[in-house]
Image (spheres, rainbow, N blue to C red):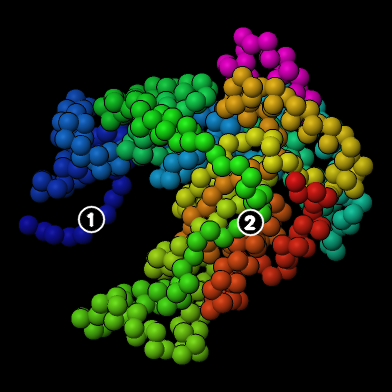
Amino acid sequence: MAHDRQIYLLDPQKLPPETIAVTFAKTSRSPESFRQIASELTDQKSSEFNEKWVVGYGHSSVAEHAVLHIATENVSRLAVECIQSNRLASYTEKSTRYQTWQPDAFYTPLEWRNSPLLSSYSKCCTALFNGYAQFIPALIQAASASDPRLVDESDAAYERRVRSKAIDVCRYLLPAASLANVGITINARALEHAIGKMLSHPLEEVRQIGREIKDAACESIPTLLKYAEPLPYLDSMEKQFSAIRPLTGLELAPWFRLIHFDPAAVDNLLAGVYYRYSVDPHTSFFSALETVRQMSSEQKQDLLRPLLAERGRHTIPLRELEHIVFQFEVTLDQGAYYEVKRHRMMTLTPRPLTTDLGFAIPRLISTAGLEAEYILLMELASRTYRELAAMNPEAASYVVPNAFNRRFLITINLRSAMHFIALRSELNAHFGVRRLALKLADEIEQVIPGICNLLPRCREESVRSIEEAFFSRLK
């Protein structure tokens, strides 16, 4: 019998997702090739296998081989936060930086449709969207006046650049009700949990989306999602912890604060890498750590430099960097937070979206002479939010614009932090999230001096220069 290596695709256009999942699952017990296993399966046999082993016996890893591509259109950006909260999935979303919104492109939640507050809600969203549309040409003009054309820059390229600069600022007016399209690639195991979270969500829109995603997905994977249901655990946790009475009189939190880090991060990092590569079969982590501790600062720097800095631009650093963990509390405008949440290899715990923490004023709005009008719109949103929140705090969040600040907790490892800093400190990133990326780098370099100047960050700006150049007010 020949044992030649074979590498090929199981075509999802020819084989249903559940059949592919069962084909891979059966290889643990069958000596046949994947092609042979697949050829012997029918939809009925695949369903029976999944019913017995995945549903009945809980072998959920089989469901990871069934992958779906789900298109979700015209969902609110508030709902998108729940949709995108799943780590083991991929998303692409309509961008507020590169597209503009029509005046009626906002969601009206069921919570307000038969309510006397519907008029207040609709007027607020309409005013924000009208302001958004009216601000764009004025900000394009202001951006053109302050940002001259580059040498050899074409008219079309220059127009795109100043328009992008204006839209980057105008998005601060868009409320969480703004409609978006999201493409999702996700496996059935992760999708079952995602649907459970959506079906347990306090917003009716999110619960409806959960039901509709389940219905659409069940056309391809009817067995694997059969028991995707609400998660009582989430409801019980909310009830238990929301009943705790908060302390009063505490200090106002700064916009960025380090909560936790490892003071011995450098030694632990180098010991972890040495533990991986040591040629001595008797090496334990503690012996590796003691070896590193005996090194001089210069020797440690000689090891850190190639580990952190001397890589190809797209080369991912070693996984051992994940052993070093930081925790931060951040207060950032909602628009910037929305970009942070796209980094799923970290743990994010956001506070609810409210108008309680003030709002940012981009400097270009002040330069264009629109600051007073902008403040009036923010004050309208704040009044409307408070009016709605008295009846339903969760659904009130729909009217909160991107300009308002939101507080959240980040737990992030060094590997993910390096990726975030490298990507989000680049000059083509939005200035709101660039500020966070540079602050994150500053703080890590301050508490772990051994990695100073080794983090992959943009050196052309600082936190202060961004605040001075791009904001008239931050809260």
Callout 1, which amino acid? Answer: Gln
Taking the image as shown, residue 437 lies to the left or right of residue 272, namely right
Q: Quadrant of residue 52?
A: top left
Q: Nearer the viewer, residue 226 or 466?
A: 466
Q: 425 above or below 351?
A: below
Magenta region, main secondary structure: helix
Callout 2, which amino acid? Answer: Phe
Q: How many marks?
A: 2
User: What percent of the width, then of the height, locates residue 444?
Assistant: 57, 68
Query: Residue visible at 68% across and 15% down?
Result: 117
In the image, is residue 209 part of the stretch drawn in magenta? Answer: no
Q: Which residues are magenta?
A: 107-129
Q: Earlier in the sequence, mark 1 or mark 2?
A: 1
Q: Quick one: SS at disc 2?
A: strand
Q: Quadrant of residue 440?
A: bottom right
Q: Which residue is mark 2?
A: 256
Quarter of the image for the N terminus: give it: bottom left
